[in-house]
Image (tube, grey):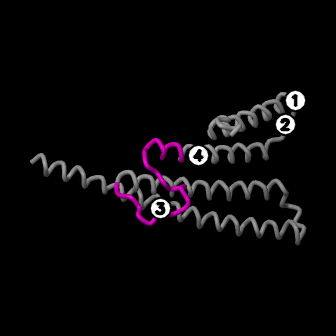
Amino acid sequence: MEKAFEALLWRSRLTLLIAVISCVIAGIALIVLGVAEVWHLITMQWQFLVEGNGSISRDQLVLVVIEVLDTFLLSSVLFIFSFGLYELFVSRIEQAQGHESQAFAINSIDQLKAKLGKVVLMLLVIKVFALLVEMRPNNMLELLYMALIVFLVAASLWLSNGGGKGAGK
């Protein structure tokens, strides 16, 4: 009875394949959306540069670029998560073992959390950048708040990259 239960328990990890497949499908869907956003950006740039469309501003173009980055980064979060779930709970991916890129190499939950944390941090940086592009400070205090936001974002990026450990090496 105990052996049968342990076998069932061990095989139950395969239910995570549903999450892995769902994340891969969602990641692919986001890549398709990102490509559509790139096409939208190209048409906007054509209208802005060639046709001289006055209803499109440089700020709008920058915001579309930010949306493209955001979409592709979010898709990478889904891929990293799906690869991590698969490698940690289902099986090693043999094709990935000899590959030079270590972006999807995940050996522990902590490593998965760290990789996802860095990508999520970049998503937040992009969102903050989009907000800063749209903001128009009305007084010195608002400008000071914007500078503080930039400082905090820079500090979080610095800390996420080791906080200057080994900078002199």
Q: Which residue is mark 2?
A: 137
Circles 1 and 4: CB atoms closer than 8 Å: no
Q: Which residue is mark 1?
A: 140
Badge 3 marks a residue whose secondary structure is helix
Three-letter amino acid code of the residue under disc 4: Val
Along the horizontal axis of the image, is 70 left or right of 56? left
Do labels 2 and 1 touch, CB within 8 Å? yes
72 left or right, relative to 56? left
Tell me the distance, in whole angstroms, between the alpha carbons under discs 2 and 4.
Answer: 27 Å
CA separation in Å, label 1 and label 4: 31 Å
- Residues shaded magenta: 90-115
Kind of residue indicated by mark 3: Val
- Against 102, residue 114 (above or below) is above
Looking at the image, is 94 positioned above or below residue 124? below
Q: CA distance from mark 2 to mark 1?
A: 7 Å
Nearer-N-terminus badge (3/1)? 3
**Which amino acid does the dot numbered 2 rest on?**
Pro
Q: Alpha carbon of mark 2 to alpha carbon of mark 3: how far?
A: 41 Å
* Residue closest to the eye, 50 or 56: 50
Q: Which residue is found at the position 73% from the left and 47% from the top? A: 130
Dot 4: few (<14), some (14–19), or many (≥20) neighbours within 10 Å? some
Q: Position of residue 53 (x, y in %)?
A: 87, 66
Residue, disc 3:
24
Report the mark closest to the observer, 2 or 4. 4
Q: Which residue corresponds to mark 4?
A: 120
Q: Are marks 3 and 1 in contact (CB under 8 Å)?
A: no
Question: Gap in Å between the C-alphas at discs 3 and 4?
Answer: 17 Å
Cβ–Cβ below 8 Å for labels 2 and 3? Answer: no
Residue 107 falls within the magenta-colored stretch: yes
